[in-house]
Amino acid sequence: MWALVGLGNPGQKYAWTRHNAGSILVNRLARRWDTKLKVMDKTFRGAEVKRDDHEILLAKPRIFMNLSGVAVKRIQERYNIPLGNLIIAHDDFDILLGEIRIKRAGSSGSHKGVMSVIERMETQDFPRIKIGIGPVPEGSNPSDFVLSPFMKSERARLQESIDNAVEAFDVILNSSLDRAMNVYNKKRSHV
């Protein structure tokens, strides 16, 4: 079984903020696969889907970003998902809006949600789909920036990021994480 956990903060207030890029990805896949996320536990909402030969759990924590690890640990234990099949999708302000990066493992950088997952899981060895939301405008506080909504002028680039993340997840499922990294970890040339 696979799981794609999209990090974000719960509630309408945060739904379209930059920090919820992972959650936006999970919502997109749920719509694409014609399924609805439902409360599955006090810590997360999710939907189990079957795609080709894969059983997949789409999930979003129902708790705030800084506690994401509580939900991810619960998901991993409840479904007995191997760490290599537990993919965390999250925002990254060091990556340009419109771009994504696939990562096999590693530190949290400064991402509090990923830090919580690492602490609860007691490992850094889980794959991530990092969705670009950057750059942070000069003079802006990164904490305020990630909690700000996407501007209308940024929606097309956000769409591009999410489309790429959907495709990358398909590549991971149907080919390999390495192939997804080779395809999606190239920096775009900006004209």
Image (cartoon, grey):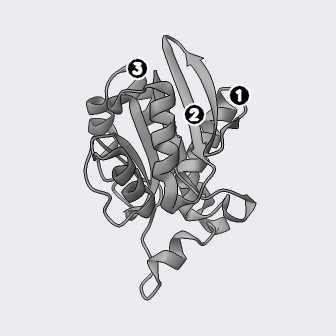
- In this view of the protein, can residue 7 be seen by the observer? yes
Query: In the image shown, does 57 or 164 lie closer to the viewer?
Result: 57
* Residue 184 image position (x, y, % from top left): 34, 42
Check disc 3 and report its element: helix, strand or loop.
helix
Is tag 3's residue or tag 2's residue first in the polypeptide sequence?
A: 2
Q: Is residue 6 left or right of residue 190?
A: right
* Residue 88 image position (x, y, % from top left): 43, 43
Q: Which mark is residue 174?
A: 3
* Residue 1 image position (x, y, % from top left): 46, 21
Where is residue 45, by image quadrant? top right
Q: Amino acid at mark 1?
A: Thr
Residue under label 1, please give it.
35
Query: In the image shown, does 180 or 74 lie closer to the viewer?
Result: 74
The crowding category of the residue bearing disc 3, from other C-alpha atoms within 10 Å (few below 14, some 14 to 19, many at least 20), is some
Identify the residue at image location x=60%, y=35%: 29
Identify the residue at image location x=71%, y=28%: 35
Residue under label 2, please give it.
58
Quarter of the image that includes the C terminus: bottom left
Q: Amino acid at mark 2?
A: Leu
Q: Tell me whether the residue at label 2 lies in contact with that at label 1, contact meaning CB atoms closer than 8 angstroms.
A: yes
The answer to whether residue 172 is above or below residue 157 is above
Query: In the image shown, does 36 or 38 lie closer to the viewer?
Result: 38
Check disc 2 and report its element: helix, strand or loop.
strand
